[in-house]
Amino acid sequence: MEKKTCDCVVIGSGIGGMCAAAKLAHSGYKTIVIEKLPILGGRYTQIEYKGYKICTAAYMILYGKNDPVYLTLNEVGAPEIETAHTGPMPQTYRMGGKDYEMTGKGALRDMISWASKDKDEENRVMTALKRAMLWYEPPDTITFDDWMLQYADSKTIRNLFQSLVAAWAGANSWEITAGQWFRILKGMTVGGNPIILKNGVKDVIDALEKVITDNHGEILTRTRARRIIVEDGVARGVAAERGGEELQIEAKTVISNAGPKKTIKLGGDHNFDRAYLKEVAERVKPAAGLEFTITSDEPLLDAPSVLFTADTQRLECFVGDCTPDGKHLLRTASVPESTVLYSPMKEYDIFLRDLKETFPDFEKRGGRILLARNFCGDWPFYGTWPGDCLGQKTPVEDLYNVGDAVIPGGWVGGSGAAQSAKVVVEDIKTRVKPA
Ligand SMILES: Cc1cc2nc3c(=O)[nH]c(=O)nc-3n(C[C@H](O)[C@H](O)[C@H](O)COP(=O)(O)OP(=O)(O)OC[C@H]3O[C@@H](n4cnc5c(N)ncnc54)[C@H](O)[C@@H]3O)c2cc1C
């Protein structure tokens, strides 16, 4: 059996794991990342598919230059990454057949004003939102849609918020609680405009990989964690399998990017507090949904740009993406009516109708669906509904989770996973000295 020793071992190379590892390696901690797949990045990279670069999931740096991913790259001195646009990325909102250009500042008020034909309703909704953001955050006792019903009469306002909730939370406004949504909304208002990268998000993972290896870290692909070694309630390392051989990594700290449920399995549930086991069982519910990659002979949408639409039956947020060789790609996600119970085939038919309604000249422009994917189970939209994540520490000492099931309030997706890495690394720095 091969043995290795380090300060920190990271299980999984998703954006959360890679950000944590880059920060630690950059701060002088001997860090080892193990990844079961042959590629790094998890749901935050690209792969080749039929001559196209396909995202494993994420496309954008959601909060622009305020994004924890972007800030991590700067902090660890990663190589510069080329963006696809110089100014803010163009974003359009379609409502009632009309397109509205969204600007960063005051966008929420503008959207409410476009959606409501009634000034009284607009003021009522704005006042209620402001109060909920700045004074009293509504509790998790009602859904956001029920909360909104107190203030909005028009279906258009509720549709507007449904599409925002679905786009950011990966769940519906009738599923997510008012508290969960306001925690996200607060984050959105301090975040920046999304960024699309010229060569896609793999550049981020490549840059973090370089930082880790330049700072004496090690990254092992095709290496699967089989067990987290726990002694007297303290994590001591990881037993892994690499090429059919056992590898034992002794470490002062273990960070799991495999998701809280797998972390418990790897650590052995007898090592976890009962309250924690109950919390994970009840609160970790992955946000599931469908994603489509579309190609066309002529562009269906300018690239780069985003079109949100409240006119379709499901949320659709269409992203016009860049491809280096002049091919046209459009990516879109669709959140089913129930993220817990749905039929992917039925959702696919609804999506086709939505697609043709949004782009009536789809066929004329040579549009075709390159790939349709159902993100669920271990490979979901989000590890759990944002705004309802667990903390990063586990009851096992020196064992942390990072990733999109343990996002600090207000953040979502890969950005939130990177923020969880920030919280974890700050804690490690107060407890562990580099060797
Ligand atoms: C369609 C879609 C679009 C999205 N768009 C965006 C976007 O534009 N921007 C954004 O920020 N977010 C977006 N997201 C969300 C984002 O992709 C995820 O939130 C984020 O990538 C999750 O990262 P993570 O750190 O949780 O790790 P994950 O991506 O879950 O990676 C975990 C890694 O751990 C590895 N692993 C698991 N078990 C083991 C083991 N036992 N041993 C070794 N390795 C193991 C896995 O192989 C994997 O590589 C999108 C999601 C979807 C589905």
Image: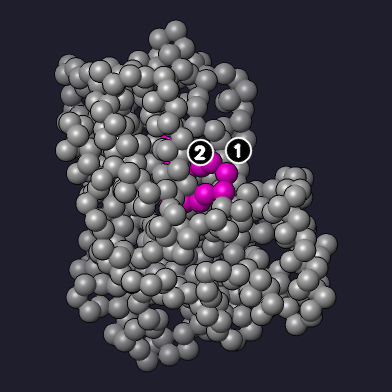
Magenta stretch encompasses residue 311: no
Main SS class of the magenta portion in the image: loop
Q: Is residue 110 left or right of residue 359?
A: right
Q: Residues within 10 Å of mark 1 (few under 14, many from 20)?
A: some
Q: Mark 2 falls on what kind of element?
A: loop
Q: Which residues are magenta?
A: 402-414
Q: Residue 406: which disc?
A: 2
Magenta stretch encompasses residue 406: yes
Q: Nearer the viewer, mark 2 or mark 1?
A: 2
Q: Residues within 10 Å of mark 2 (few under 14, many from 20)?
A: many
Query: Image quarter for residue 196?
Result: bottom left
- Residue corresponding to mark 1: 283
Quadrant for the C terminus in the image: top left
Residue 15, horizontal then vertical, whole percent: 36, 45
Query: What residue lies at 51% left-to-right and 51% top-to-bottom?
Result: 412
Query: What residue lies at 32% left-to-right and 44% top-to-bottom?
Result: 75
Residue 109, horizontal then vertical, whole percent: 66, 71
Query: Image quarter for residue 291?
Result: bottom left
Which is more toward the observer, 351 or 322? 322
Name the residue type under label 2.
Val
Query: What residue lies at 60% left-to-right and 38% top-to-bottom?
Result: 283
Q: Is residue 398 left or right of residue 366?
A: right
Which is more toward the observer, 124 or 280? 124
Observer able to see residue 374: no
Ligand 1 contact, mark 1 (Cβ < 8 Å): no
| Residue 399 position (above or below residue 390) | above
Quadrant for the N terminus in the image: top left
Residue 108, horizontal then vertical, whole percent: 63, 68
Query: What residue lies at 36% left-to-right and 52% top-to-bottom?
Result: 70
| Residue 152 position (above or below residue 279) | below
Name the residue type under label 1.
Arg
